[in-house]
Amino acid sequence: MQNPPRWVSTNGDVERPNVARLFDYYLGGAHNFAVDREFAEQSMKHIPTAAMVQHTRAFLRRAVRLCVADGIRQFLDLGSGIPTAGNVHEVAQQADPTCRVVYVDNEPATVAHSRTMLRDNPGAAIADADIRDVDAVLATPEVRGLLDLSRPVAVLMVAILPYIADHDRPVELVARYRDAIVDGSYLVISHLTGDEQPEMVQKLVGVAAETLTPIVARSKTDVETMLGGFDLVEPGLVLATSWRGEDEPETGAEAVAYGAVGVKRPNG
């Protein structure tokens, strides 16, 4: 059972729903407020948001286990939100306690809560940085202190790229992280799509706008352009629930996100 939260003082906005706290609530965590729970319960009357988030988390866990099995021992989780139950450090360190994880987020309350949660874990930390500023992320004391970027690392961009607007050039953003890591490093990516369930995803986009954190759904072709320079691990770019998951119908909440894991090829 997850430990009760150790609340921290922050300047975060507690009067409107917060994306990181909503994700925490959908995943059964305890780091959320009444405003988040009320908003989440209302949204779930129209969209299976909790199921969507839980499917994404299941994909993340499978991908992290693959990375550890393939010898990766360090992880950079971009736009991580609150590292609630079943997150990267728990999964990776359960497989190998020597694994090191740096989460990255720039929302004040998320960073504050995360630092409190991780303070007793020397192999995990959260960096306060905007993932769109690659140089700033890589220069944080947490990244410099815990990760050795001269060795392979897994860069995780799970459910974060929909929050990167087109004018912020998400394809180029992924490429900048690719160029900053060595050959043999891994990229784990998932992305919201309306290819299979356009009406449901459009509703989700509308709900996200109410949190003042808009999202963008993209097609499979759009996501493929983000994977240049990486050799994809089987089964390639597929619906996230199909990525090494149990066979299940690809409908409803199970068909709203693509997922893939790639290995940086030489001269990628």
Image (cartoon, grey):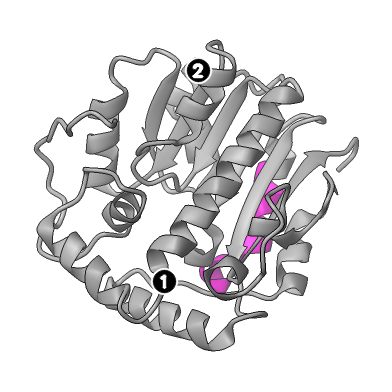
At 28% from the left and 32% from the top, the residue drawn is 2
Q: Which mark is residue 48?
A: 1
Q: Which is more toward the observer, 177 or 215?
A: 215
Q: Position of residue 158 (x, y in %)?
A: 55, 51
Q: Is residue 146 left or right of residue 214?
A: right
**Where is 173 relative to 155, above or below?**
below
Q: Which mark is residue 146?
A: 2
Q: Is residue 204 left or right of residue 179?
A: left
Label 1 and label 2: CA atoms lie apart by 37 Å
At 22% from the left and 43% from the top, the residue drawn is 30
Neighbor class of circle 2 (other Cα within 10 Å; few <14, some 14-19, many 20+) is some
Q: Are marks 1 and 2 in contact (CB under 8 Å)?
A: no
Q: Residue furthest right?
A: 266
At 30% from the left and 78% from the top, the residue drawn is 45
Segment tinted magenta in the rendering: 165-177
Q: Give, as a three-letter code, the residue at label 2.
A: Leu
Judged from the image, the secondary structure of the residue bearing numbered disc 2 is: helix
Give whichever of discs 1 and 2 has the lower sequence position.
1
On whether residue 166 falls in the magenta region, the answer is yes
Q: Which mark is residue 181?
A: none
Q: How many numbered dots are placed on residues in this image?
A: 2
**Where is 57 relative to 103, above or below?**
below
- Is residue 173 in view from this perspective? no
Q: Position of residue 115 (x, y in %)?
A: 28, 29
Quarter holding the C terminus is top right
Neighbor class of circle 1 (other Cα within 10 Å; few <14, some 14-19, many 20+) is some
Q: Main secondary structure of the magenta part?
A: helix
Q: Which is more toward the observer, 31 or 226?
A: 31
On whether residue 125 falls in the magenta region, the answer is no
